[in-house]
Amino acid sequence: MSLEEAQRQLEAAIHDARVSFDCIALDDLERSHTNAITARAAVDAAEYAIRVALEERRKAEESEEAKGAGG
C-alpha cells in the first residue's frame, strides 16, 4: 500500500459520494445507497493505506534513531 493508493481511493470516494448525493435528488435511493457503500469502502481503504504508511515511517524513524545511538 502506498500514499498514491490512498489518494486514488479518496478520489474514488469523492466520486461515489457525489453520485450518491445526485441519486438522492433523483429519488433513486437504491443507487444512492450502493454508491454510499462504495464511497465508505474507498474511505476505509484509504485510511488503511495511510495507517500502513504511518507505521512504515515510524519504523524507519526508529531504525534511524537506533543507528544514530549505536554509532
Image (cartoon, rainbow, N blue to C red):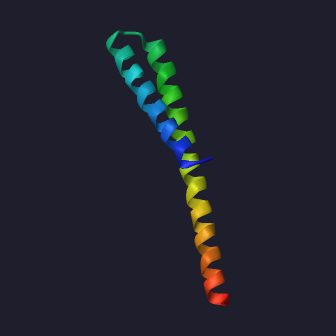
Image quadrant of residue 41? top right
- Residue 11 versus residue 69 in the image, above or below: above
Image quadrant of residue 57? bottom right
Pick whichever, 71 or 50, lies toward us. Answer: 71
Q: Residue at x 63, y 68 (%)?
A: 59
Pick whichever, 8 or 38, lies toward us. Answer: 8
Q: Residue 4, image x and y in percent?
A: 53, 44
The quarter in which the C terminus is drawn is bottom right
Q: Residue at x 35, y 17 (%)?
A: 22
User: Image check: 10 left or right of 59?
Assistant: left
- Residue 13 versus residue 3 in the image, above or below: above
Residue lying at the far front of the rendered structure: 71
Q: Residue 64, image x and y in percent?
A: 61, 77
Q: Residue at x 63, y 88 (%)?
A: 69
Question: How many marks on residues?
Answer: 0
Image quadrant of residue 45? top right
Q: Residue 3, image x and y in percent?
A: 53, 48
Pick whichever, 9 or 22, lies toward us. Answer: 9
Q: Residue 53, image x and y in percent?
A: 57, 55
